[in-house]
Structure formats: C-alpha cells, structure tokens
Amino acid sequence: MDWLENQREYFGSLSNFSDRLLDGLWTTIQLALLGGALAFVIAIVLGIVAGSPRLWLRGPARVLIEFFRGISLLVLLFWMVYVLPLFWMANPDLPGEELVRNSFLIGVVALGINYGAYGAEAVRASLTTVPNSQWEATTALSMSWLHKMRRVVFPQAWALMLPSLTNLWVHLLKGSAIVYILPGVNDLTFELNNLRRPTDIWFSHALIGLVTYFILALILTLFMHALEARAKHKLGRGPSLKQILTPDPPTAVPDSAGDPASTAAGTDSKSGGAR
C-alpha cells in the first residue's frame, strides 16, 4: 500500500509540470512528422533509382542504401553532431554552419536518412512486383517515363509498399526517443528523464512514456491503414474507407408466416391433400 501511495503522489506531482511534458510531446511529434516526411522522400527517390536498368544510376543508389542501412542511428547522430562541425572549424568560410549546429535539424535529418534507406528497399521491391504486362502496356502506348510511373506503375506499387512504410514510420517514431541525447532537443523522453532525476523513481515516468508512445504509434498506424484501404479501393481490391467505417446494417430475415411464396406453397399442399 505504501508503494501505491508513493506512486499516486508522484503521478500527482507530474501534473505540476504538464507544460514541460506537453512541450516535450510536441517536439517528439515534430521529429516523427518531419523525419517521416524526409524519410518518405528519400525512400521514393532512392527506391526508384535503385530499380533503374541503368547501372550508372542503380549502382550509386544501392551503395547509399546499404551504407545508411548499415549505420546505427546512434552512431549517425554522434557523427553529425561532433564530427561534421569539424569541417566548418577547419574551413570557417564554408556556408551553412548555423544549420550544422542546429541539433533539432540534425535529429530530423538523421532520422530521415536512416529510415529512408530502409524505406527505399521497400519501394524498390514494390515496384518490381508490378506485373511486366503493365510496363509493356505503357511502352506500347508510348507513355513517357514520368507519365507511366504516375498513372500506371506507382499507384499499384503504392498499395503494396504501404504496410512496410507503416512499420518503418512506427519504428521512426520510437527511434526519435534516441534524439534526446542531442543538446537542445527537449523531447518527451528528455523531459521525463529530467523529472525523474530528483526522485530517481522510474515507474511513473516510464509508464507515462510507454503509454504516450503507444498512443502515438496507434494513431499513426490507423492513419496509414486508412491510406492503405484507400489505395486498394482505387485499384478495385477492397472496400472504400467509407464502407469500412460505416458498414451496411444487417438485413432482416423475412418471416415465413408473412412470406407470400410460403403461404402459396402451404395452400397448394393443403389443396393437394384435400384432393
């Protein structure tokens, strides 16, 4: 009972720091949204280029994908924070020093590069699953490369790549907690860790972080599932989002007593019996 009373007091004390927790939550959401947007752009570009039949395009794209997939996000963050600024220290005339020293921007870029490399492989694999007949049809119609990708190939691949992109975006959301090690990035994990230090009580702070990240991941997953349902419906492979959200009411089973066909059948049987 004493333990429960202590936890109740700690939870109550956290309400005094709700502003800090909300600011940290907003920073976490910004990291997930901006990092996810950058990762999506990188994944689309590298995924398309990596599937090119031209070696001089495919080769460098594959090297970049494998390189950034093989680097730990934590190592990439340390390298961008502590190694990259050395180039500006050695060459003060180089432009962009303010950007390199912006910890929040570095966190967004690191998340985008790391998870964008994983997403690029999902994009490339989805493009290769589009039937060859679709590619041949666009060639027969003399479509330009941009037109065939936008109107025929990419819509089919988009529905296939969305489940993988959903998983990656959820992983990116959880991976954004690592960015709190950067100076000046006061995300939710940073604020919870700072509030924990005076009391060294882990349970209440860890529980708040666990529930918050779970709710964010659930919202993100539902949003991506809605996009997937919409993409499949456009291809004629499933119900629309409106049909999923508002299913048809169950149809009533007609009463056999009031069914004209049943009544007629019963009358005939009686007549036959009388004859």
Image (cartoon, rainbow, N blue to C red):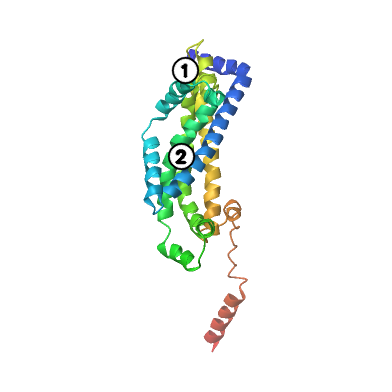
Whether residue 45 is visible here, answered yes or no, is: yes
Tag in front: 2 or 1: 2
Q: Is residue 214 left or right of residue 54?
A: right
Whether residue 208 is visible here, answered yes or no, is: no
> Is 124 or 144 nearer to us in this picture?
144
| Residue in the image at 48% along x and 14% along y | 201
Q: Residue furthest bottom?
A: 275
Mark nearer the N terminus (2 vs 1): 2
> Is 239 or 75 nearer to us in this picture?
75
User: What residue did someone put label 1 on?
Assistant: 202
Instruction: Say which amino acid is labelled 2.
Output: Gly
Up-down relation of residue 232 to residue 206 (above or below): below
Up-down relation of residue 81 to residue 136 (above or below): above
Q: Is residue 64 left or right of residue 197?
A: left
Q: Which of the 4 image quadrants contains residue 168?
A: top left
At numbered mark 2, what does the secondary structure look like: helix, strand or loop? Answer: helix
Label 2: how many Cα within 10 Å (few below 14, some 14–19, many 20+) = many
Q: Position of residue 205 (x, y in %)?
A: 51, 20
Instruction: Say which amino acid is labelled 1.
Output: Trp
Whether tag 2 and tag 1 are in contact, CB under 8 A, the answer is: no
Q: Which of the 4 image quadrants contains residue 19?
A: top right
Q: Quadrant of the C terminus?
A: bottom right
What's the distance in space between the residues labelled 2 and 1, CA to CA? 33 Å
Query: Which numbered circle lies on residue 116?
Result: 2
> Is 270 or 164 nearer to us in this picture?
164
Q: Position of residue 70 (x, y in %)?
A: 36, 35
Q: Residue furthest top?
A: 198
Up-down relation of residue 30 to residue 270 (above or below): above
| Residue in the image at 42% along x and 26% along y | 74
